[in-house]
Image: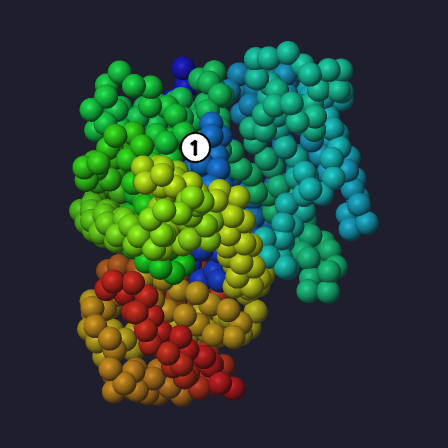
Amino acid sequence: MMTAAELRRMFIDFFKSHGHAEIKSAPLVPENDPTCLFTTAGMHPLVPFLLGEKHPAGKRLTDVQKCLRTGDIDEVGDPFHMTFFEMLGNWSLGDYFKKEAIGMSFEFLTKKLGFKPENIKVTCFAGDENAPRDTEAASIWMENGIPEKNIYYLGKEDNWWGPAGQTGPCGPDTEMFVPLDRPDCGPNCGPACGCGKWVEIWNDVFMQYNKTADGKFVPLEHPNVDTGMGVERVTAFMQGVRSAYETELFAGIFAKIKELSGNPEADFNNRSARIVAEHLRASTFIIGDGVTPSNVDQGYVLRRLIRRAIREARKLGITEAFVSKIAQVVIDEYSPFYPELKEKQEFIFAELNREEEQFGKTLENGIKEFNKLIEKFPPNIENKIISGRKAFNLYETYGFPLELTQEMAAEKGFKVDEQGFQEAYQKHQEQSRAGAEQKFKGGLADHSEATAQLHTATHMLHAALRRVLGNHVEQAGSNITAERLRFDFTHPDKVTPEQLAEVEKIVNEQIKRNMDVVCEEVPLEEAKKRGAIGLFESKYGDVVKLYTIGDFSMEICGGPHATNTSQLGTFKILKEESSSRGVRRIKAVLIH
């Protein structure tokens, strides 16, 4: 039986044997990408290199990337949905293309995973007004041994990737499917029928176009390959089970949940236990990458995951403090592959315990609010119904799930307007989605001249902050659009107006020196010895890009940057505020 650890190693070693350099997983928080809260795919951290930047490790890369997607939070608990997952990937940055990519995919599926060619079905892009039918990919599959009857052509909704935002690299993909041990649903059973027999196991994306702002699909001069294979899904398939929750990836967590419940005979692979296990696994990784619970952005998602896990744990009979005990299991099992978890262990425990304690107080306040609500009803009223809007307010403000409100209401002889709750919840979801779409409507990792200049200004801001506030200042996050920069940094106190004025003055003085921005590729250890600041060091390999701005700033970074500070204009700080506990945030612009 193949374990997840064996799968990871087999995949990486296979591609290394085919000339790929192994790179480290990037953090779950994207660097300088305003379009996404979290890293959602293996290609996400590589966008600058897919757009033409030179990667220090070369043109052929492979890794296991930590990913998190928030769209399915409410569905977590069924056998399939998860927020956190690991993505195996290999990339060609302007090197090989369809023939080599498909050939290696076929070899790995048949020689390493043991699938027979006749048991593999693939889909290719059917073509539309923007791009032709991908008969090239289909022909290559047949040359490798996939029967023609096992090749399907599907439209853009199935076999096209990107762009991630409004513009950027995109192209057709080819997806690989393998069968579950169940009968066909009929003569047309295949990847498109939807019966569930055929499971997607891998996806090769051929980025051969760039979608422009006016909607045109322009062929890329150097097309790229991006592939993705989910660790959890493939592990489950190789072990002959229907869900990752039935693999060793969750066995230790479920055992701890059972122990904490005090009910060792119970079957805890149920919806509530899955939510507890999945959400706290995700939360452990998120905090490990430096995020703390808050009411905004990544911190809000983290808080929602932790609190949902605590609520569901109560249904399992767990009422004591427990979240860090689950995190300990996650750290023990994953730190051999993700050493940052062990390194940040105490920080992870502290943040989880603090949030658990705070949420306990919130629940107490919610119970008080519920009792006030009940007391407002006349004692002899016959129609004892709590409105859906008020039930939703308990959910949104105090974290009460509908089930908890219903249970408490029943004890008092009340009912809850469930339909009204669902309507209020749906309205909230639509408003949240609209806000997110507005907030992240830009193209993925915009690499315009304006963002390159702001990226350079961010380095200078960081250096100036360290001069004014002290060397404890470290980057805790960065978000750059074409209009402004946003820089989060570690600092315990509000930055005074005088300190901000001094920072702004230093940056502008340095800009006026008209210094060249020099990029070098050097070993990571050499960069450290030179005194470089290593932002998000875990994302970089043995060879890194080192950007030096005169004698003022030296940082490890992926780019892009201006070539000289004379291009930056005048630096202006717009706002300084708290981002989360111990982290401050500055928003600034460049005026030309």
State which quadrant residue 514 falls in: bottom left
* Residue 246 placement, left or right of 146: left
Nearer to the camera, 91 or 30: 30
On the image, the x and y values in percent for residue 144 come to: 67, 23
- Residue 269 appears anywhere in the view: yes
On the image, the x and y values in percent for residue 448 come to: 57, 69
On the image, the x and y values in percent for residue 110 come to: 56, 19
* Residue 441 placement, left or right of 536: right
Residue name at image x 23 percent, y 21 percent: 263
Image position of 113 with respect to 512: above or below: above
Image position of 447 with respect to 193: above or below: below
Extreme-front residue of the structure: 380
User: Which amino acid is tagged 1?
Assistant: Gly
Residue topped by disc 1: 77
Category of crowding for the residue at label 1, using alpha-carbon neighbours closer than 10 angstroms: few (below 14), some (14–19), many (at least 20): many
- Residue 29 appears anywhere in the view: no
Q: Quadrant of the N terminus?
A: top left
